[in-house]
Image (cartoon, grey):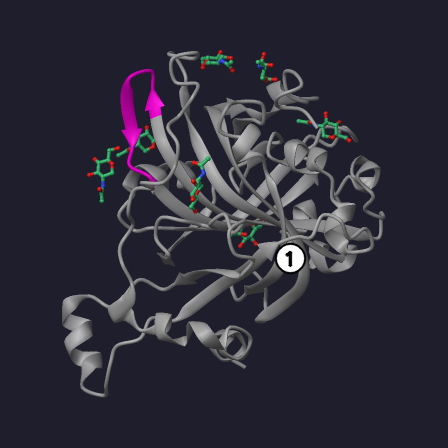
């Protein structure tokens, strides 16, 4: 069954978005607050990540089957049981993100860009039994952002070009109305030449590659899945050292959960919903329901291309970036 078909059933109200005519290229996030730490760390790359982070609680053996075989037996199950996740279950992390206001001091580094990826936290990259790293195999990126594509390839992430709908908002706050919010990942629309060709048979369509649909979680309900994933889990995994198929270099990505864009009126919001993924992220199209997640904006500081071995035991630097 095609992913588009499954998602059509699930998200039938979104059908009109499947036409390439309605897809817009990447836009900057006009509603995102500015980077609050650029002047605090003028000699580092900083920015903001406005994201929905979803946690697919899957059987451990399923997660192992998705990982490259060299990492399949490197999951540190004992490192996540303290987040109320049993050792026979694994938290696959699906992120829809917009990176915004990326700068080096006063110098803009890259335009805003959306991305979508499946990541594997709690991987014992160094084989020491305790250092937790986060693996990424594939990442969907807009084809226009050469800086992001180049940076991703350096880590050995396989970059898959994509258009996003909406292009500038991975998930909107829904406190005013409790309706579901949809985020979709499409194959880039055909080029003009292709477009004319495909248009003979009707409107050109871009293939749907993945989708998420979330609504705010009712935090008063205690028995539902979302309440079992504490905020500390999200702080923890967003501060694990990132790596890909090029295990010679690692990405020390710090996420600050204590700045003005993540607190007060912008405090993280627990969400619950559905996630649809297709190949090559998973072997067969699959839809998960009752998925817990978190919608949050946060400041980041990134130090690129570090020797992974030098990051042994990394656990953040303080209360803002450790969970
Ligand atoms: C995050 O993005 C959403 C749109 O997806 C926007 O409404 C919200 O204001 C942004 N949050 C911050 C703190 O900038
Ligand atoms: C800023 O970058 C420098 C050089 O890459 C690095 O040594 C330092 O640890 C970074 N600052 C922080 C707060 O991580
Ligand atoms: C987004 O912002 C960058 C500056 O960071 C600018 O160069 C680019 O033109 C903007 N893109 C759009 C579509 O407005
Ligand atoms: C990563 O490396 C493994 C082999 O270790 C390979 O099977 C896989 O195709 C590579 N790429 C991705 C995106 O997983
Ligand atoms: C691409 O990344 C490499 C590091 O892997 C860097 O040396 C090079 O300058 C980058 N090129 C562009 C166009 O960003
Ligand atoms: C995440 O949790 C693990 C184990 O529970 C811990 O060793 C590590 O220091 C934590 N990392 C961060 C960044 O909070
Ligand atoms: C926020 O968190 C960072 C990283 O843990 C820390 O260095 C900084 O002092 C914290 N800021 C405040 C105001 O607590």
Q: Within 10 angstroms of label 1, few (less than 14), some, or many (20 or more) residues?
A: some
Distance from mark 1 CB to nearest ligand 4 atom below 8 Å: no
Q: Residue at x 71, y 54 (%)?
A: 64
Residue 147 position in % (x across, y down): 31, 37
Residue in front for this viewpoint, 181 or 314: 181
> Measuring 35% from the left and 29% from the top, which residue is drawn there?
102
Q: Is residue 166 left or right of residue 236?
A: left
Ligand 1 is in which quadrant of the figure? top left
Q: Which residue, given by chain and number where applicable, does mark 1 sit on? A: 66
> With respect to residue 124, does 36 lie above or below?
above
Quarter assignment of residue 145: top left
Q: Position of residue 15 (x, y in %)?
A: 41, 76
Element class at badge 1: helix
- Residues 112 and 279: in front is 112
Q: Position of residue 77 (x, y in %)?
A: 81, 42
Q: Splitting the image into 4 quarters, where does residue 6 fall?
A: bottom right
Q: Which residues are magenta?
A: 103-112
The count of marks equals 1
Q: Position of residue 174 (x, y in %)?
A: 51, 51
Tell me if residue 8 comes above or below residue 176 in the rendering. below
Q: Residue at x 70, y 28 (%)?
A: 323
Q: Is residue 253 left or right of residue 133?
A: left
Where is the N terminus found, in terms of image quarters? bottom right
Relative vertical location of residue 258 with respect to residue 143 in this rendering, above or below: above
Name the main secondary structure of what is drawn in magenta. strand
Position of 137 relative to 18 (above/below): above
């Amino acid at each position: 069954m095609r992913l588009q078909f499954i998602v059509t059933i699930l998200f039938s109200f979104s059908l009109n978005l499947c036409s390439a005519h309605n897809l817009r290229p990447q836009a900057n996030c006009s509603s995102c607050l500015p980077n609050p730490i650029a002047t605090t760390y003028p000699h580092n790359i900083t920015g903001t990540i406005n994201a929905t982070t979803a946690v697919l609680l899957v059987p451990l053996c399923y997660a192992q089957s998705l990982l490259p075989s060299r990492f399949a037996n490197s999951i540190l199950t004992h490192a996540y049981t303290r987040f109320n996740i049993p050792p026979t279950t694994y938290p696959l992390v699906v992120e829809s993100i917009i990176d915004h206001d990326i700068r080096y001091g006063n110098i803009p580094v890259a335009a805003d860009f959306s991305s979508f990826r499946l990541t594997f936290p709690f991987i014992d990259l160094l084989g020491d039994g305790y250092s937790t790293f986060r693996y990424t195999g594939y990442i969907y990126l807009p084809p226009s952002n050469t800086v992001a594509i180049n940076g991703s390839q350096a880590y050995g992430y396989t970059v898959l070009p994509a258009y996003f709908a909406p292009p500038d908002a991975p998930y909107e706050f829904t406190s005013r109305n409790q309706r579901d919010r949809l985020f979709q990942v499409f194959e880039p629309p055909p080029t003009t030449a292709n477009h004319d060709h495909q248009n003979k048979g009707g409107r050109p369509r871009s293939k749907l590659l993945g989708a998420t649909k979330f609504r705010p979680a009712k935090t008063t309900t205690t028995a539902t899945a979302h309440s079992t994933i504490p905020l500390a889990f999200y702080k923890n995994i967003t501060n694990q050292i990132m790596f890909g198929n090029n295990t010679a270099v690692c990405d020390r990505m710090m996420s600050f959960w204590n700045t003005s864009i993540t607190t007060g009126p912008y405090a993280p919001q627990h969400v619950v919903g559905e996630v649809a993924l297709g190949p090559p992220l998973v072997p067969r199209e699959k839809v998960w329901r009752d998925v817990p997640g978190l919608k949050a904006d946060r400041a980041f500081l990134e130090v690129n291309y570090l020797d992974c071995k030098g990051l042994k035991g990394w656990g953040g630097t303080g209360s803002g970036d450790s969970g």
